[in-house]
Image (cartoon, rainbow, N blue to C red):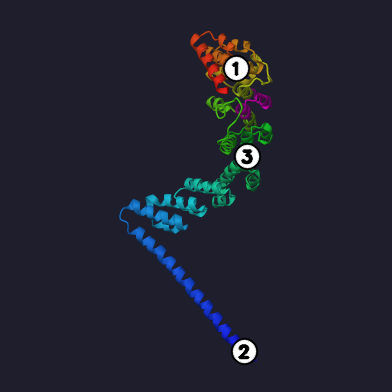
Amino acid sequence: MLSHPLNNNARIAAYVVVAAMLVVIGVVVNIHAAGRSGTVRKCSSIILQQDRNACLTSLASSSNNASVCGMVSQSGKDYCYSEVAQADRNPRACTYLSSNNMTYECILEVANATRGYGACRYLNGSMESSCIETLAAITGNSTACGTISNGENSTVCYSGVYLSEAKRSGHAYYCTMVSNTSTVPEVSNIVYLGEIGAANVSYSGVGTPGQGPSVYLSEYNISYSAKDYCYAEIASDTGNATDCAMVSNSIVRGICNQTSGTQTAQSNIQINSSTISSACGTYSGENFTTCQGILQIGEAISSKNASNCGSISETIYKYECYAALAKAYNDSSFCGYISNSTASQACMQDIYYNYSATQ
């Protein structure tokens, strides 16, 4: 059957329109390509290497084209790829960096900026797990920990998230979900994740965030579990030493009572030669003396009893005990037990400035 002449004309007109559109698109693409190649030629014509690298890096970043970084001199390639990755949230660009550590840091930055775990998939093995763990702690998203196949890494991830949540909120409830592991690498990783996840958090408590139990634990090489660390840190950060009662290790509990600086501390132990021997028996020399002092200071604060300080043989710890009591209860009368006039005056001034700061 013959077509109507008008239908043929309409069909021909349609073909003409489509052909014209294709020509226009082709022209636009060619102009864009010519402009880009012209810009590349312009950058490449710059004599000074530093300026040439800067030009190419800017072009690569603005066009989200990591291949342009291939034209940058060797000394500037890593910077170029990093710029493309961060400016365009492009984790693939990170994979061109010259070292695994740089690639990891680059991808972690992209993942953090996008709050997307997909970026971590550009890493392999333990680095991928570490990326997920870190982002989970920062975002407080424990669900992501379930995607980690390695059981130990998954445990670290969950515990890191709960520790960071505890520090963010100041609630020790989250510590119940932190692992009780005391394996040093695992505890270190959990503590690291907790610190990163709770970065820039401020507290209204009377404790000193970031300068509590961890200072003593690291300085005197005291072993502890991740769960005990969580309770002790929250008590110190918030100034609520009732949480210290949840700490199972007596040495860490003593440190917790000492650093929480509160009147609500509750004592779980009575300090005597037996408990000191039991808790500090693995230490010797100066470390044993330090351990003993920590326990006695902690007990003095928890019981508000200056006689505990008087039983300390080492003068420096005895003075520190009286000063800690004075600060914990904002009571300068405890400074009067310090026989050295200089140390006693320092104790009084500390109470004065501590009181002034709270008014």
Q: Quarter of the image containing the C terminus? A: top right
Name the chief secondary structure element in magenta.
helix
Q: Quarter of the image containing the N terminus? A: bottom right
Residue 305, quarter of picture: top right
Q: Residues within 10 Å of mark 1 (few under 14, many from 20)?
A: some
Disc ID at residue 330: 1
Residue 109 image offset from top left, x and y in percent: 52, 46
- Measured in 3D between alpha carbons, the distance from the residue under mark 1 to the one under mark 3, in whole angstroms, is 35 Å
User: For residue 305: magenta?
Assistant: no
- Measured in 3D between alpha carbons, the distance from the residue under mark 3 to the one under mark 2, in whole angstroms, is 73 Å
- Res 94 visible: no
Looking at numbered disc 1 in the image, what kind of residue is underneath it? Answer: Asn
Looking at numbered disc 3 in the image, what kind of residue is underneath it? Answer: Val
Residue bearing mark 2: 4
Q: Which residues are magenta?
A: 232-250
Disc ID at residue 161: 3
Residue 71 image offset from top left, x and y in percent: 39, 57
Q: Secondary structure at mark 1?
A: loop
- Residue at position x 32%, y 59% in the image: 45
- Residue at position x 64%, y 23% in the image: 253
User: For residue 247: magenta?
Assistant: yes
Q: Are marks 1 and 3 in contact (CB under 8 Å)?
A: no
Residue 225 image offset from top left, x and y in percent: 63, 31
Mark 1 or mark 2: which is in front? Answer: 2
Q: Is residue 41 left or right of residue 216?
A: left
Task: Tell which circle, 1 or 2, labels the residue nearer the N-terminal end.
Answer: 2
